[in-house]
Image (tube, rainbow, N blue to C red):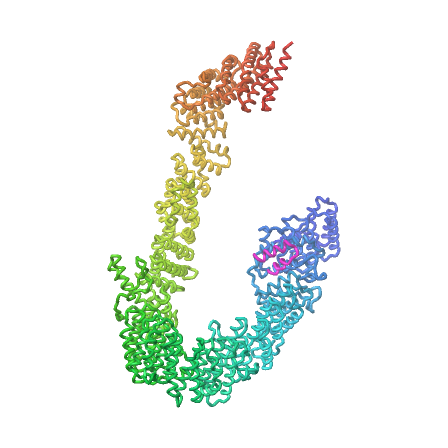
């Protein structure tokens, strides 16, 4: 009840009670009350309720007076009332009046107090309906009432809710509660509901109510505690009401949570349900809600300034557990200090805290540490941390239960989270760190991962800790870096890399130790700590400095940790001081320290650094211990060479003393170790005395040439050492003696000539090292000097043509080295010849080695002799790294190196190389020679590019590289493009410009023609396998093979197509190669490229999507190089890009079409309307064309483009995402394309995509689609059939053959169509139709109704019209005329039942809104169809059914038209048609009799028309209708019989037609129902009727005769005229006797009957005749029967003959019984003695004659039914015989047979009857005999 209502009610009540008491003095009032008391005392209990309704409110109202006596009188009355009604709950109190009185604004407090008491009393006495309606009124304005009254009213309401709303709340009551929503009253009610649900009948915690205060408990219970059942009911009812009120989740969430923790299962389930259904979207960040939830959890029991009764206890354990899961999802809960802190400590240290609660408390702690604001965390953090550590101390690490495990887990997580948020709490001490590291060792495995995360999180806390603390951390980490548990080692390493930078030696030492760890993740982290950034897969921490520590500091720390390093005696030991991997990491790190310091230090003056280097050598020497790994030995030996390259004198001096130690490693298993030690031995030899050096060389030669066979490793090491030592010695001043050099050269030459390729290449390598220092002198053999080149020429030629790639590489590089100092042109020619012999090699490494050798021959290479001999130099390409690194940086490195002096004798060599490259190799017709030329030209350009001779050749080099970028070989392309980049960098400005122009021309297709390559037979035109195989299975790649294939196929012109394809392939390769070059040049070209962007960007975009991955990569390179901001560039050139891509979409090249589709698909993403407006239509057409491409990959790309443009179009047409104007413009562009080119396409994928798009447009476009509705709707409707699966048509054609019903199949097709996207689109169209749309849409629909083809389309049109009319309603009225004129003929003409029904429904719904004249015409036209052919009749039924279901109100006014049609059409012969009308009749006519009485006139008229019709079917139908009409109406039809009778009697004579028997049936039915009216109006009529029927009985057609006899029987019975006997019986006898038995025992028919009725059944006719005879007996006079007695007996005897079947005999038995009955009544009633004598004689004759025949039937027929009928007949005859016994007894011949049959009879009933007959005869015999 809202406030105005309450006020109006109060005023009404106030005026009433005021009028009763106003104007009276206190004495008068007292007297009035006294009289009331008297009436009360004298009143019976039965009338007390009515009296109280008047007295009680008035008495209480009188309390407003100040008079004491008056008040006492009221108290006396109320006391009397209390006594009378206290125990009689059936006596009601005036609740409504009391509430009105209470609401009076003028009421005194005392009045209100008494009112509230009696209201409470009255509530228990009112009906449930009244109670639940007034309860919400108590809550209106309850906030303005005193607290005590609030509590009472809330308790009353709560009780009502418990009584009435446990299961449901009615809408009427709910409306009253809804008035409260949003008011203060609602808040009070919800608070009371919460307290009620929190209240439990048996409180826990020693009687303390969980979640409530003592005062709140009192509010809920009042004076009487609530029972458990009542409490459950109240809680359930409250939840039902709160659910129905749909309040905000934040208001009711605490109530639902409390319900979920209730002890009553129904309440708990309801709470769970509401929590999921109504409060799933609750805002857990609402401060007010979180505060209320914390109050439920914490209570206020801990507050000191609250009285004890008002202190709220914490919620129950179940409730608190549930609340904790909520707090862990709320950030506000984490920031609600001090409630948050109180909650956490309540969980962890509360008196009643369980393990589960502690676990949840720790989980909440983790949440708080993650999400609390810093100001809050500062207050809580220290306190909570103390509690966490205390908790960890209380739990043993061995605790196995799940909760304790989870609790410890959350403790560690909390520490980790707190460390990240408040690192200052941990920074000053390492006790927590120590605790965590210890926990990692001691905790069980399942917990270690969590402790590990916490430990890692704690690391950041010590980032800026005091140095003393950091020292302690260092010790802690060192102690834990090598413990057993891998988690501890991981954390120690993580701390070391996180806390300390690269300069920190202890942490790096820990990393070195970690590098040898057994766990991969620890090893990876250790290496990342030592060498940050080297592992590209991991991001480098920006906070770690890359400044390496000083070498001396790092070495000192390592030596402190392992003092044994300083022990010189330990060198050469077997054991390592550290693991191999630690050594490897240590060496690598120390070298980086060395390099970093060496770059900043003056090596010559820094003695400390020199001392460190010596100690470093010592460490490296220790690493060469025997058990070290191969990798370690190689790394240590190379490190020594690195030191030697910086301190050659120191290293030479140091190892000159350790030659023996070095020599032992010459036979090491590792190649790199042998190489490095040989090089180190060479360096050391330079510090030896010349004699010692010569001696060392001699030892090496003797070892090599000794008799003992050496291992390969040993021989290799010795050869390397011999080369390095000799090379270093010839450089000395003075050098070694000539004889020693000769011995060395002889040894090496001999080995080269004799040994295998592997050894020969090593010997050649040694010769190369010597030759790079001095020209190789001729060998003096027997005083004859012979050039080494001449001696080795043949061997080297064999060596270079072998298959040992490594040997060839070493040999050819050695040739280059040997030629550096060589001046003899003959020798140089030999070298060139040998190198050029490799030009057809297909091994890349050999080609690069040959290029390096040519560079040494050319001169000016960027390496010196010392670099080759005294550093870890391997080859020029590895040193420059130009192939694997960035070209520009490689060039910069090369230019910074020293270059060798130019020598004049190399000029001829350069000419030879130039001629070979430019005249022979680069333009060769063999691809491998072109590849070799490319490699060698690139090598010369890179290594000798600064040389003047190369500078002069740059134009030619550029042209060559430009030509080579079109090569098929990817290697050639890559190298040519790199060459172009290098030419660009080292060339002048004009060259740079020319190069850019040429490359742009190549990419855009406008470049100049390349220099022609002459085709010869074996020129490869295509890459092998790219164009398949020849018919004989051979390969197709060379020019000769292609020509042969063209000739074999008889198409010589095919070769031109092959060459065209080859040209295209070359063009593609050129573009790819140009892209490689361009990507490098673009970085340097800068502004020079801007003029070309317009032409380049569209093509580059397209090429990036080329199917060839290599082209894609190449173009991606150039794009990145050319374009800084990809998105901006594409946006700037968008129109050009679209134009280019759309043109190329129609290219004859499939790869262009595919690339364009893919490019368009990507570029379209996120575009706006103004960007794509001009191109959208062309894009759609291009997509459709690509989807129908001959190549599958292009079709796939087209599908992708279609999806992209569909997504874009959908967004642009969606009015929620795009302005309406733009949506309409997009629609105008796209929709016509989709409807014409798309949906009408013959390609399935195009059609499906178009339909999907149209559906999407219709869904998202909203009103923007209105202008196109007519086109869209018609297209979709036509598509329902045109896009149907063709398999359905096939199935329909063969449906009958496989037994599928056509109608079921049609329904299936329609159902599939209804689920299609086309129908979904039509439904969207319906939603946006308006009046303007209708004007365009209806004519199109009308056209489609007339001309649409296909089942789905026609049904779809009809259904769409239905939906359309439903949507627009009366808006269809202007179009009803055209639609109705169109739809009715369509329904009639449709052959499909489904289609017919659909159009009928459409017609019906239009009828609903048609004008009355249109409606009448339609209904009349529809009704007229019933008289048409079968299709018309079905159409009529279907239409009428649709009218009845859809437009029933309209149809109700035309029942006079349709009822007769429905009634008559029920009797159609066609069962399908009759069932349709029967169903209609049953559905729409409530009572058949009443309906027929109402419309009998119209029905009779229609029937009469049918009878008079020329159609036999109509006559038959009308006759059957007369039968039904007569059956239902009976005598009620009398007023209309004349018309029907006249018609029937006119129709009866004349020719017979099929079904004419129905006329006879109608006549008999009419006579049966209206016989009295017929007889009364025309006494001659019955005779006329009888005459007609009798005449019909003589017809020849058996069926008609049978009907005539049936009719005759009914007419006789109906009119009951005795005269009929004499008129009919003779003819019946005559007709019966005509069925005479033949000799064979068969029944004979007259010849004329046989002729007409070949299949006639005389037995049936005879049966009908007997039935007529029986009817005649029934109406006859007894005298007439006696006169015909002989005929009767003859007829019966004839009929009982064996020739007739048992059915005839059954009729005979019935007729005999009827005759006996007639005779029996005559004997009893007649007074005439003579007649009685005649009857008695007749009876005796019947008995004597018929009884044996009846017994004979019993004996011969075995049918039980016949036996019973025969026994009954016999009993009837016997009874008649008994009634008229003979005077003298005559022995009966059949007595024994009767007894015999009685014994053998199986039917109990027949047996009983026969027994009775026997008994009667026996008794009769005794009575008659004297």
Relative to 1560, say whether 159 is above or below.
Answer: below
Question: Along the horizontal axis of the image, is 237 left or right of 1248?
Answer: right
Q: Position of residue 1314 (x, y in %)?
A: 43, 49
Quadrant of the drawing holding the C terminus: top right
Magenta-tinted stretch: 253-277
Q: Quadrant of residue 1294?
A: top left
Is residue 256 shown in magenta? Answer: yes
Question: Along the horizontal axis of the image, is 1749 left or right of 1091?
Answer: right
Q: Is residue 1505 visible?
A: no
Is residue 158 shown in magenta? Answer: no
Q: Quadrant of residue 461?
A: bottom right
Q: Position of residue 309 (x, y in %)?
A: 71, 64
Relative to 1258, say whether 1610 is above or below.
Answer: above
In this view of the protein, which residue sits in the foreground, 743 or 1029?
743
Quadrant of the drawing holding the N terminus: bottom right
Relative to 781, say whether 922 is above or below.
Answer: above
In this view of the protein, which residue sits in the foreground, 262 or 1423?
262
Q: Position of residue 544 (x, y in %)?
A: 51, 78
Q: Position of residue 1577 (x, y in %)?
A: 46, 22
Residue at horizontal 38 percent and vertical 35 percent from the top:
1429
Q: Quadrant of residue 1599?
A: top left
Q: Is residue 1674 visible?
A: yes
Q: How many marks?
A: 0
* SS majority, magenta: helix
In this view of the protein, which residue sits in the foreground, 265 or 244?
265
In this view of the protein, which residue sits in the foreground, 1119 or 75?
1119
């Amino acid at each position: 009840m809202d406030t105005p209502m309450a006020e109006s009610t109060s005023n009404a009540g106030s005026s009433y009670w005021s009028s009763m008491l106003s104007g009276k003095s206190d004495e008068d009032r007292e007297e009035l009350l006294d009289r009331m008391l008297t009436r009360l005392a004298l009143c019976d209990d039965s009338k007390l309720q009515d009296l109280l309704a008047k007295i009680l409110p008035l008495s209480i109202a009188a309390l407003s007076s100040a008079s004491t006596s008056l008040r006492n009188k009221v108290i006396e009355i109320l006391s009397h009332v209390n006594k009378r009604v206290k125990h009689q709950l059936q006596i009601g109190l005036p609740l409504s009046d009391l509430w009105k009185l209470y609401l009076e604004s003028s009421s005194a407090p005392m009045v209100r107090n008494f009112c509230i008491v009696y209201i409470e009393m009255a509530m228990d006495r009112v009906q449930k309906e009244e109670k639940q309606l007034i309860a919400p009124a108590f809550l209106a304005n309850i906030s303005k009432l005193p607290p005590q009254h609030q509590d009472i009213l809330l308790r009353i309401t709560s009780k009502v809710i418990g009584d009435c709303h446990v299961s449901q709340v009615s809408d009427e009551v709910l409306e009253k509660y809804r008035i409260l929503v949003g008011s203060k009253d609602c808040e009070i009610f919800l608070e009371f509901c919460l307290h009620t649900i929190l209240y439990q009948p048996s409180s826990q915690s020693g009687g303390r109510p969980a979640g409530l205060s003592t005062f709140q408990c009192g509010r809920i219970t009042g004076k009487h505690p609530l029972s458990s059942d009542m409490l459950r009911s109240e809680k359930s009812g409250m939840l039902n009401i709160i659910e129905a009120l749909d309040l905000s989740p934040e208001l009711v969430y605490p109530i639902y949570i409390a319900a979920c923790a209730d002890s009553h299962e129904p309440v708990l389930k309801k709470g769970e349900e509401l929590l999921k259904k109504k409060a799933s979207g609750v805002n857990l960040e609402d401060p007010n809600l979180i505060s209320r939830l914390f109050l439920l959890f914490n209570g206020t029991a801990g507050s000191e300034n609250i009285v004890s009764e008002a202190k709220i206890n914490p919620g129950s354990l179940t409730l608190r557990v549930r609340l904790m899961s909520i707090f862990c999802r709320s950030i506000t809960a984490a920031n609600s200090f001090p409630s948050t802190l109180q909650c956490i400590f309540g969980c962890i240290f509360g008196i009643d805290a369980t393990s589960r609660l502690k676990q949840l408390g720790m989980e909440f702690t983790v949440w708080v540490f993650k999400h609390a604001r810093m100001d809050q965390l500062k207050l809580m953090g220290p306190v909570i941390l103390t509690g966490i550590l205390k908790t960890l101390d209380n739990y043993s690490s061995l605790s196995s239960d799940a909760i304790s495990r989870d609790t410890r887990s959350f403790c560690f997580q909390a520490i980790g989270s707190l460390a990240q948020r408040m690192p200052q709490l941990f920074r000053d001490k390492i006790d927590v760190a120590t605790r965590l590291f210890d926990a990692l060792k001691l905790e069980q495995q399942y917990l270690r991962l969590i402790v590990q995360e916490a430990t890692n999180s704690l690391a950041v806390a010590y980032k800026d800790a005091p140095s003393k603390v950091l020292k302690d951390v260092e010790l802690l980490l060192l102690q834990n870096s090598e413990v057993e548990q891998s988690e501890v080692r991981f954390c120690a390493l993580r701390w070391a890399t996180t806390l300390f930078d690269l300069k920190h030696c202890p942490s790096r030492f820990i990393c070195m130790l970690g590098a040898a760890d057994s766990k991969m993740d620890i090893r990876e982290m250790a290496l990342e700590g030592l060498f940050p950034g080297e592992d590209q897969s991991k991001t480098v921490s920006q906070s770690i400095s890359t400044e390496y520590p000083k070498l001396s500091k790092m070495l000192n720390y390592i030596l402190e940790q392992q003092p044994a390093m300083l022990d010189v005696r330990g060198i050469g030991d077997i054991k390592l001081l550290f693991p191999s991997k630690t050594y490897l990491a240590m060496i690598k790190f120390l070298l980086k320290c060395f390099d970093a310091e060496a770059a900043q230090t003056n090596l010559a003056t820094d003695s400390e650094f020199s001392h460190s280097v010596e100690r470093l050598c010592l460490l490296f020497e220790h690493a060469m211990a025997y058990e070290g790994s191969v990798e370690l030995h190689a790394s240590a030996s190379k490190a020594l060479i690195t030191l030697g390259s910086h301190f050659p004198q120191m290293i030479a001096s140091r190892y000159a003393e350790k030659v023996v130690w070095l020599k032992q490693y010459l036979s090491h298993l590792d190649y790199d170790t042998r190489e490095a030690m040989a090089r180190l031995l060479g360096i050391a030899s330079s510090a030896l005395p010349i004699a010692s050096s010569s001696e060392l060389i001699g030892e090496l030669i003797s070892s090599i040439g000794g008799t003992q066979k050496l291992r390969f490793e040993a021989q290799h090491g010795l050869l390397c050492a011999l080369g390095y030592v000799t090379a270093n010695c010839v450089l000395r001043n003075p050098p070694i003696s000539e004889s020693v050099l000769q011995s060395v050269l002889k040894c090496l030459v001999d080995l080269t000539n004799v040994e295998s390729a592997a050894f020969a290449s090593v010997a050649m390598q040694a010769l190369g090292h010597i030759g790079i220092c001095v020209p190789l002198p001729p060998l003096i053999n027997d005083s004859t000097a012979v050039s080494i080149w001449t001696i080795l020429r043949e061997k080297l030629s064999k060596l270079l043509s072998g298959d040992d790639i490594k040997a060839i590489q070493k040999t050819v590089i050695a040739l280059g080295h040997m030629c550096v100092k060589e001046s003899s042109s003959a020798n140089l020619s030999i070298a060139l010849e040998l190198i050029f012999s490799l030009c057809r090699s297909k091994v890349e490494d050999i080609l690069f080695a040959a290029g390096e050798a040519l560079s040494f021959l050319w001169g000016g290479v960027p390496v010196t002799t010392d670099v080759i001999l005294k550093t870890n130099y391997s080859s020029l390409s590895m040193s420059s790294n130009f192939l694997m690194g960035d070209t520009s940086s490689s060039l910069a490195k090369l230019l910074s190196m020293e270059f060798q002096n130019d020598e004049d004798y190399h000029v001829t060599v350069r000419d030879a190389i130039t001629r070979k490259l430019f005249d022979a190799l680069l333009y060769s017709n063999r691809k491998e020679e072109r590849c070799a030329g490319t490699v060698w030209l690139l090598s010369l350009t890179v290594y000798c590019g600064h040389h003047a001779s190369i500078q002069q050749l740059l134009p030619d080099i550029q042209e060559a590289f430009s030509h080579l970028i079109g090569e098929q070989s990817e290697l050639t392309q890559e190298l040519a493009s790199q060459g172009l980049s290098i030419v660009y960098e080292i060339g002048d400005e004009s060259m740079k410009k020319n190069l850019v122009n040429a490359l742009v021309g190549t990419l855009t297709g406008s470049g100049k023609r390349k220099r022609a390559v002459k085709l010869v037979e074996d020129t490869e035109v295509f890459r092998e396998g790219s164009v398949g195989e020849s018919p004989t299975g051979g390969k197709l790649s060379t020019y000769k093979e292609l020509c042969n294939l063209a000739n074999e196929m008889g198409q010589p012109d095919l070769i031109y197509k092959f060459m065209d394809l080859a040209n295209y392939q070359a063009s593609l390769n050129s573009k790819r190669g140009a892209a490689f070059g361009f990507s490098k040049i673009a970085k340097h070209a800068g502004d020079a490229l801007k003029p070309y962007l317009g032409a380049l960007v569209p093509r580059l975009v397209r090429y990036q999507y080329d199917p060839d991955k290599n082209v894609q990569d190449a173009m991606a390179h150039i794009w990145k190089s050319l374009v800084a901001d990809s998105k901006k560039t594409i946006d700037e050139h968008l129109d050009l890009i679209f134009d280019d891509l759309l043109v190329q979409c129609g290219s004859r090249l499939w790869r262009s079409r595919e690339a364009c589709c893919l490019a368009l698909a990507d570029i379209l993403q996120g575009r706006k309307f103004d960007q794509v407006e001009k191109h959208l239509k062309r894009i759609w057409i291009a997509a459709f064309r690509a989807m129908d491409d001959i190549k599958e990959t292009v079709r796939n790309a087209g599908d992708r483009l279609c999806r992209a443009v569909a997504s874009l179009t959908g967004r642009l047409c969606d009015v929620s995402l795009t302005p309406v104007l733009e949506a309409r413009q997009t629609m105008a562009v796209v929709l016509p394309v989709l409807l014409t080119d798309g949906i009408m396409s013959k390609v399935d994928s195009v059609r499906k995509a178009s339909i999907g798009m149209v559906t999407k447009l219709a869904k998202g476009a909203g009103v923007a689609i209105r202008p196109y509705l007519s086109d869209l709707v018609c297209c979709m409707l036509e598509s329902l059939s045109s896009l149907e699966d063709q398999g359905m048509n096939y199935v329909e054609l063969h449906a009958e053959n496989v037994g599928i019903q056509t109608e079921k199949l049609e329904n299936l097709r329609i159902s599939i169509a209804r689920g299609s996207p086309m129908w979904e689109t039509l439904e969207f169209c319906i939603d946006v139709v308006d009046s303007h749309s209708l004007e365009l849409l209806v004519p199109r629909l009308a056209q489609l109704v007339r001309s649409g083809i296909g089942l789905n389309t026609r049904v779809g049109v009809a259904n769409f019209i239905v939906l359309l009319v439903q949507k627009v309603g009366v808006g269809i009225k202007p179009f009803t005329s055209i639609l109705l004129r169109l739809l009715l003929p369509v329904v009639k003409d449709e052959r499909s039942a489904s289609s017919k029904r659909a159009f009928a429904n459409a017609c019906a719904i239009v009828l609903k809104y048609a004008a009355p004249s249109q409606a009448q015409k339609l209904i009349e036209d529809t009704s007229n169809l019933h008289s048409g052919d079968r299709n018309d009749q079905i159409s009529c039924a279907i239409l009428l059914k649709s009218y009845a279901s859809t437009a029933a109100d309209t149809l109700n006014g035309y029942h006079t038209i349709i009822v007769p049609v429905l009634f008559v059409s029920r009797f159609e012969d066609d069962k399908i048609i009759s069932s349709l009308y029967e169903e209609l009749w049953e559905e729409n006519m409530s009572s058949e009799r009443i309906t027929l009485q109402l419309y009998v006139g119209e029905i009779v008229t229609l029937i009469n028309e049918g009878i008079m019709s020329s159609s036999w079917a109509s006559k038959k139908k009308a006759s059957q209708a007369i039968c039904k009409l007569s059956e239902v109406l009976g005598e009620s039809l009398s007023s209309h019989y004349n018309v029907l009778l006249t018609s029937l009697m006119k129709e009866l004579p004349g020719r017979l037609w099929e079904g004419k028997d129905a006329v006879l049936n109608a006549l008999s039915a009419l006579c049966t129902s209206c016989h009295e009216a017929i007889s009364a109006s025309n006494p001659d009529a019955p005779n006329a009727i009888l005459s007609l029927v009798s005449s019909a009985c003589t017809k020849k057609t058996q069926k008609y005769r049978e009907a005539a006899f049936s009719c005759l029987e009914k007419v006789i019975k109906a009119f009951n005229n005795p005269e009929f006997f004499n008129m009919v019986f003779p003819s019946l006898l005559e007709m019966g006797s005509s069925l005479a038995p033949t000799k064979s025992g068969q029944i004979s028919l007259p010849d004329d009957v046989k002729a007409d009725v070949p299949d006639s059944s005389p037995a049936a006719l005879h049966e009908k005749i007997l039935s007529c005879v029986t009817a005649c007996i029934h109406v006859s006079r007894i005298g007439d029967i006696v006169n015909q007695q002989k005929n009767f007996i003859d007829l019966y005897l004839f009929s009982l003959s064996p020739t007739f079947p048992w059915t005839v005999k059954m009729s005979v038995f019935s007729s005999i019984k009827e005759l006996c009955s007639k005779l029996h009544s005559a004997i009893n009633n007649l007074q005439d003695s003579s007649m009685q004598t005649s009857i008695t004689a007749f009876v005796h004759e019947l008995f004597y004659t018929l009884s044996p025949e009846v017994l004979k039937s019993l004996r011969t027929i075995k049918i039980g039914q016949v036996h019973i009928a025969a026994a009954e007949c016999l009993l009837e005859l016997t009874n008649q015989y008994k009634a008229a016994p003979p005077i003298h007894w005559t022995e009966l011949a059949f007595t024994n047979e009767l007894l015999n049959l009685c014994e053998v009879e199986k039917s109990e009933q027949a047996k009983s009857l026969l027994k009775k007959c026997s008994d009667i005869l026996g008794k009769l015999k005794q009575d008659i005999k004297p």
